[in-house]
Image (spheres, rainbow, N blue to C red):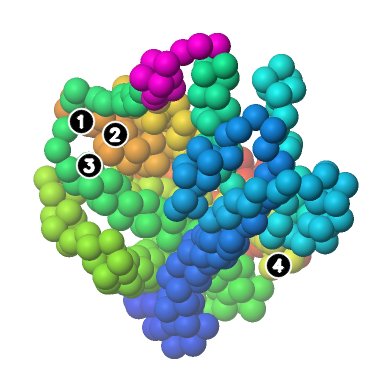
Amino acid sequence: MRDSLKVAGWEIRKMLRNKSFLISILLTPVIMVVFGALPTLLAKFETDRSIRLYVIDEIGVFDTLLSSTANQNVVLEKYDGDVASLESQVLGKSNEGFLVLTPDIYETRTVVINMGGDGVPNIDDFNRNLELTLLRSLLERHGFDSEAIVAATTGFVTHTVSMTQKGDILVMIIPAIFGGLIIMAVFITGMMTMQSAIVEKKDRMAEILLSSISPYSMMQGKILGCFVLGMFQVLSWLFFGIIAAYSILKIPVMRYLFVPQMPIVLFFALAGYLLYSSILVSFGATIEDMTTATNFQSMVTMIPMLPIFFIAPVIVNPNGVIAKVGSYFPLTTPGVMLLRLTLSTTMTVIDILLPALLLIFTVWLMMRLAGKIFKTGILMYGKNATPKEIWRWMKM
């Protein structure tokens, strides 16, 4: 264990001296916020721009339509000329358009809004108001009085709620997000573990290290070192997240982190991290150079992403058959259990204990297999290991 700690300390010091790693820790949250917020801000900028629509009204609904769109980004103007003149007037103007309301629309049930320029602006609110206005106009033509029309066109609001999920939903969501960040760290620090093994193998540094320590200690040290770096990265993200959540959304994240289910969430997240890291480090020991690793990287990174396939059915029924299958398939256990712990309030001790025991056994088994692969693969030069060779190493 002492040798493993030495290797872990060396890995940690090496990365903390790497300016690109430190910069990535600071920039990653900023980039995530920018990519998440910028499209919304840009879309809002386009949505908020004023759209002028000219209306040729032959059915007498303009005044009603005008009053219903008073607080929207659509400016209505009644037009008394012909369609040809109106077309030439708005042509080429992206923020202007027109619509023609004739008695025929009661038969065709179609209204075309013609915009003068390229693109189609977001005027969904206006479209809904127009549809409602035309529906009420149609009912008036059929002799209904105003009270009946209002009653018939006022919609109903339906909500689907769970009788078991009551109270503050953030109590379950925020710990799960924290656990998800830990697993997400695999994509960065796990790749660093794999690349570190490849570089040391290529530079023959592994031979020097293995002259004084065992392959198992070297592998465990690499996993432990990158695990500490991953936790450092997650805590950095959490720090920025706490500040952003409280400043923008007024959510006291720290209060929701210290909840009874947090230890269970941490267990599945950390076990998942160790599982995926052991797979990545053993894979790195079988690769000859970074070029080959890049070719296979997308395939390997799919392993931690397998729980994504279970998201939809687990959200629909967190205690269903598919959710339970995902809980007992080791490669998806961490992600699926985090999701189930968030959504389900009726999970029993057995529902949590059995996947936990399965995950512990899988991590132990994968660490042993990874050690066997690493022991032989790290010293093999000149070619990549074949599946047949890897299988033979695992049986040794």
Q: As drawn, which residue projects farthest toward the front?
A: 80
Which one is earlier in the sequence, the residue at label 4 or at label 2? 4
Q: Which residue is mark 4?
A: 289
Where is 143 relative to 369, above or below? above
User: SS for tag 4?
Assistant: loop
Residue type beneath disc 2: Leu
Crowding near the residue tagged with mark 3, few <14, some 14–19, many ≥20 C-alpha atoms within 10 Å = few
Which one is earlier in the sequence, the residue at label 4 or at label 3? 3
Q: Which residue is mark 1?
A: 165
Q: Is residue 135 magenta?
A: no
Which one is earlier in the sequence, the residue at label 4 or at label 1? 1
Q: Which residues are magenta?
A: 142-155
Residue 85 placement (x, y as % from top left)? 85, 51
Which one is earlier in the sequence, the residue at label 2 or at label 3? 3
Q: Is residue 271 left or right of residue 101?
A: left
Whether residue 136 is visible, yes or no, is yes
Crowding near the residue tagged with mark 2, few <14, some 14–19, many ≥20 C-alpha atoms within 10 Å = many
Q: Is residue 143 magenta?
A: yes
Residue 343, which numbered label?
2
User: SS for tag 2?
Assistant: helix
Crowding near the residue tagged with mark 4, few <14, some 14–19, many ≥20 C-alpha atoms within 10 Å = some
**How far apart, in angstroms, are the residues tagged by discs 4 and 1?**
51 Å
Point out the frontmost of discs 4 and 1: 1
Is the C-beta separation of discs 2 and 1 under 8 Å? yes
**How far apart, in angstroms, are the residues tagged by discs 2 and 3?**
9 Å
For image coordinates 50% across by 38% down, the residue present is 64
**How far apart, in angstroms, are the residues tagged by discs 2 and 1?**
8 Å
